[in-house]
Amino acid sequence: MDERNITYMFYGLAVAWGLLAVYAVLLGLRERDLTKQLDTLKRMVEEKK
Amino acid sequence: MTTLRHAAAIAVKDLRSEFRTKESINSTLSFSVVILLLFAFAFDPTPDMIAEFGGGLLWIVFVFAGALIVNRAFARELPNDCIDVLVSSPASGASLFLGKAVAAFVLLFGIECICLPVFGILYNVTWWRSLSGMMGVLALGTWAMACVGVFISALTVNLRLREVMLPMLVYPVLIPAILPAMMLTNTLLTGQPLPSDFGVWLRLLVGFNIMFTTLSVYLAETILVR
Amino acid sequence: MRTKVILALGAVALPLLLRNLYAIMFLVPDEMEQGPIYRIFYYHLPAFFTAALCYLTALVSSILYLLKKDQKYDAIAVSATETGLAFAAVNLITGMIWGRISWGIWWAWDPRLTWALICWLVYFGYLMLRSAIDDPTERAKNSAVLSVFASASVAITWKAIEWWRTQHPGPVLSIRTGGVQKIDPIMENMIYVNTVALLFLAAIFILVRLRQEEVQREIDALRRYAHAMN
């Protein structure tokens, strides 16, 4: 088996993990953004009361 | 029965208003001819090449034209809030959709019938060798475009990015109809005896039409009535 | 409660994923003709199963939304579609890398590949449509209808492929070949185990995404409330 075969296998596994990791990170970023928005809004509503 | 009568009334209304202003006929027709012209420059086609991708080329032009036509289907009703009046009229959502789809079909089919001779002249193709088959395939493919296109244009009519959104949503959904239409047109253009997979493609095209017509008539009520 | 479920799922999924990675790299035997490259397959096929299941979930919850008009189903539909797209991307790209070695090209206009790509584009269009509509009820209704429509198109394309020829390798799992053992049972089991692992991961993604939809709704409600107070 030539070297390229093994290299591409690693590329494949890296892509599989990488893509899912990227999606997880994106989810995390959105989570942070949403939490921040929610906190700001809650504080704003509290202040106005 | 009333559904069909209402649908016919709406189709006639759409066609009449279109023929009075001729805004989408004129623009779509000139647009299609320009694309046909551009393709001739881009590929400098020989007769062999045309036999290979003539059907594809023709359908790309039709699909572009189709996006312009179906975009107008509901957008035409936006000024003066005509769409709200139509929705609150006794016509059901299904008949409203059917009428619009039939009107779009007639317009598109007419434009295709003009494009076909232009295509024949510019690319030196004898396209009338099996005229009835050609018209049949054209009608089936055009109905698929009109049906899916008008349905999705009802979904996107209120969006700011309507013009971009519509083709982006319609084209991928249309692929299973356009692919057989291209294949069948290619075969019919060459004028050779029909190959064995002709039936498969025809079945696919007819199946697509039946499935999506049923589905959109059934779902039209949901999207149109707010 | 939701957080605990997510954490528990994560506690199962992460060790399983890592164990599978180890097993895929070192424990399973090499395929005779293809060499190491075939190991990509342990992600390629499970990712496809996961994506297909996500799309199916999205279809079912879109139909449920149209029947019941409950925002909950809309949230499930969007979460499942988005997760499905992530896994479908894994499926597509690992497939391309495999194709580069086995077929010598990155992309063949093979029906199955084309189908997967069309599928991806169709559901990406669904997300685009969602992002373009501001009103939540309108968005939920229109995207549910589009989801049903898109699924019909995807299904009919799938059928067309079975009629047409394909250069993509045919089914190898014994459930698809009618009990005929086409691959080593060790390999087949590895595929199932990794499918389970990816399904856990997908469940986590969907649950997190679902909670985000709920937070988003809460934010919208608070915005309206704050606006009304002015």
Image: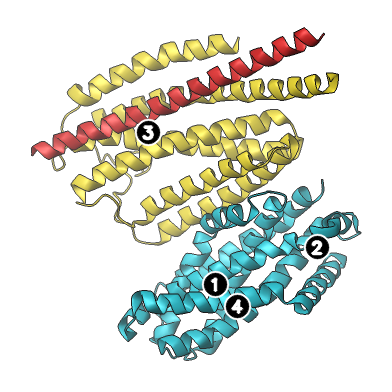
Chain colours: A red, B cyan, C yellow
Per the image, the residue denoted by label 1 is B62
Mark 4, secondary structure of its residue: helix
> Which amino acid lies under the numbered mark 1 shown in the image of this protein?
Phe
The residues tagged by marks 1 and 4 sit, at their Cα atoms, a distance apart of 10 Å
* Residue visible at 52% across and 43% down in the picture: C124
State if disc 4 and disc 3 touch (CB < 8 Å).
no
Disc 2 sits on a residue from what chain? B
**Could you tell me which quadrant the C terminus of chain B lies in?**
top right
Residue B3, above or below C204 = below
In the rendering, which numbered label is found on residue C147?
A: none
Question: Is the same chain shared between marks 1 and 4?
Answer: yes
Quote the CA–CA distance across marks 2 and 4: 28 Å
Q: Which residue sits at x=57%, y=40%?
A: C127
**Where, by quadrant of the figure, is residue B132 drawn?**
bottom right
Q: Residues within 10 Å of mark 1 (few under 14, many from 20)?
A: many
The answer to whether marks 1 and 2 mark residues whose Cβ atoms lie closer than 8 Å is no
Q: CA distance from mark 1 to mark 3?
A: 39 Å
Q: What residue would you read off at disc 2? A: B95
What residue would you read off at disc 3? C46
- Judging from the image, mark 4 belongs to the subunit labelled B
Q: Secondary structure at mark 1?
A: helix
Using the numbered discs, state the Cα–Cα distance from disc 2 to disc 3 in whole angstroms.
44 Å
Depth-wise, is mark 1 or mark 4 nearer the camera? Answer: 4
**Distance from Cα at disc 1 to Cα at disc 2:** 25 Å
The dot on residue B29 is: 4
Q: Earlier in the sequence, mark 1 or mark 4?
A: 4
Q: Which chain does the numbered disc 3 sit on?
A: C
Mark 4: few, some, or many residues within 10 Å (few <14, many ≥20)?
some
